[in-house]
Image (spheres, rainbow, N blue to C red):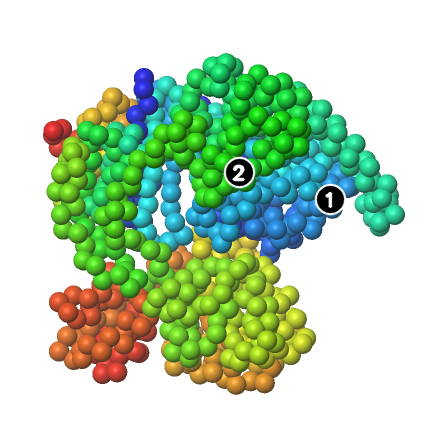
Amino acid sequence: MAVTNVLIAGVGGQGAILASELLALAAIAAGHDVKQGEFHGVAQRGGAVFSHVRFGDRVYSPMARRGDVDFLLALEKLEALRYAHFVRKGGTIIVNDHTVEPIRVGDTRPYPDDAIESLESRGFDVVAVKATEKAIEIGNHRAANVVLLGTLAGSLDIPDEVWDETFKARIPEKLLSLNQQAFSAGRQIPKR
Amino acid sequence: MKRLMSGNEAIARGAWEAGVLFAAGYPGTPSTEVLERLAGYDEVDAHWSTNEKVAFDEGVGAALGGARTMVTMKHVGLNVAADPFMVFPYAGTNAGFVALVADDPGMYSSQNEQDSRYFAKIAKVPLLEPADAAEAYEMVKTAFELSERFETPLMFRTTTRLAHTRGIVEPGDRVEAPRKPFSRKASQYAIPVYARFRRPELEAKLERLREFAEEFEGNIIEDGDASVGIVSHGIPYQYVKEVMPEASVFKLGMIYPLPAARLREFCARFETVFVVEESEGFIEGELAGMGITNVIGKERFTNIGELSADLVAAGLKGDSVPADFAQELNILPRPPVLCAGCAHRGVFTTLKKLGVLVTGDIGCYTLGCLPPFDAMHTTFCMGASIGNASGFTRAGEKQVVAVIGDSTFLHSGLSSLVSAAYNQVPTTTILLDNGTTGMTGHQEHPGTGHTLKGAPAPAVDYETLIRAVGVQHVEVVDPWDLEATERAITAGLAHDGPAVVIAQRHCNLLPEEKAREKTPYAVVPEDCIVCEDCFMTGCPALVWEDDLPYIRDWECVGCSMCAQLCPVDAIVLTGEV
């Protein structure tokens, strides 16, 4: 199998790393070779965080090449814009329709309100998901990462029972049901 | 069983399985998690040392005393430990001794880019470098075997990408390495006249290592396309395989010393050979020294920053690197900032107001150099601030302040303060005591009262310590109290001799601070005169909303600094509105 490249991006504290770890673990359980490389700056909070997850028969580089990413999972709109140049032509961008205002250091520019339209105009297949809203409905805004992971799972060839086992193995008992609900809510969002 | 492990976790696991008994280090991204993971194993006596030289010295003692030992540090930590690193090889080790050194190409969390491979050559010690987590796990076990077989300290080098990339590892069991008794031979360990005898022996050992490199199974030739030959290693090897899987590749696991005969034979098979390595042209230089000249290296693969598969493809095949349209859109950045209510904000708000010259040090507080503070004017390396301030003062600058964190002070600031006290240099040092090693992720240190393994420990009494070295003016202040902070710094500057202000307030991210019940502040819109004074602390909890300052109550920790700055008392505790 050719290597599948997923890039997960978000803001510190949104759970981009946990989502990529879950994906990597599920890919291992499904029998793939996996590499997951993450980037986080010196900021404890509020900084941009992104992580590459690559799986297939044999994975070498921990990071996908620019223009090679099949799926960008963005936990925030500005971060979708920031990393979209990694996505291949016709690739899919699953984006949380949610804004986290950046902390500004002497930068007064407004937050771009047309991030999703801008990505669509560049020819990407954009799936906008109100993941944070969904997660709040389910009980915790922090589960937005797993809602999006559920949406991504609809496009991947990883069996449901593998996801289920992965969640049971990785997520603490008291948060398991919340995350399972978030995942299945995301899973029900139709592929386009 | 297959497990997902980062390079750092894999190294710790491999070292544990290799029977490591003692491990020491100082936190430094990207090396930190190796020691943290080792500390999780009961069999390993692991601790944070005050600095990397101390860790190294302790490691030398432990290894001579017969315990398999690992010391961990980032690249600049090796600079601190360079003294024993250069001398220990003369004696050689007893039990296995591995120094884990993590470089940071791209400077994700460092002040410099440094290719530490050169250190191994200067010290004449073998250097191994793995290419992914699975290899790191196996190679670290080999490292201990080689260290004992050749009775030499060994350097195990990683980079940020290796350290923080997860991959599949299939761990095994620990094999105990029994302690090896130490034999007291002064001729091996002391004084120049003996060292002169050891010197040729060091060369002889290096010669044996060169011979071994020829047969080392971590140096692998992967035969492929007979027209393209590539020499590579570590993470760059992965990029090579990614972009040119068909090429013939000589993958080096031992970077020093190199297998000269095999390299000559390999390179002779091709018209030209690409040498793909990150940072400097270390291997390229070694090849040149062997007389191998049909090489293309740094002219195609930059020595600046981190390499990538895209950059390697550009160098090997002339591929163009796809544009980053994020640059062209000029997307709002998310810069690193001090947290809401961070105690450092009180100190830097005050320093900005005073307009003094500030020498800085290594920690979160380095962000004091950015707006709105612009109140740090130099930062070089761990512990430099106090010495730098003394120098500025000696050059004739008045009103110089050194700013240094608690962990950094204990790491290497103390000796500079002793020098300033001894020479009675009239500078003011602000010790930012936030009760932890903040930037690297809240590690314990000698001032926190706990060890790496969580055991209670005596906490350094800074005030007594600082008075004991001869500083007569010492004041402790809460940096959340802006008036008191200004008074203390001003008094320190007025003092005719070295002065220290201890700004004491725990980091807001420590668990007990996070758990503390907080009452946020709020702006009373009808009282606000929009003077913007409250923005002087740069707090991320304070934003503009409808052309008025607004406090995001879910971020506010109730520090009150913005309220103190408000000239009309328009910022009040919620509940008092």
At label 1, the amino acid type is Phe
Q: Residues within 10 Å of mark 2 (few under 14, many from 20)?
A: many
Query: SS at mark 1?
Result: helix
Instruction: Identify whether B356 is placed above or below B510.
Output: below
Q: Name the residue carrying label 2.
A: B158
Residue on which disc 1 sits: B88
Q: Residue at x 74, y 32 (%)?
A: B206
Residue at 41%, 58% (x, y): give it.
B510
Tag 1: Cα neighbours inside 10 Å, few (<14), some, or many (≥20)? Answer: some
Is residue B151 in view?
A: yes
Spot occupied by residue B321 in the image (x, y as percentages of width and height): 34, 35
The structure residue drawn at horizontal position 14% and vertical position 38%, both measured from the top left corner, is A120
Gap between marks 2 and 1, in whole Å? 21 Å
Q: Relative to residue B6, is residue B539 depicted above or below?
A: below
> Left or right: B26 with respect to B488?
right
> Could you tell me residue A100's position as x and y percent?
22, 52
Residue A127 in percent (x, y) is at 15, 35
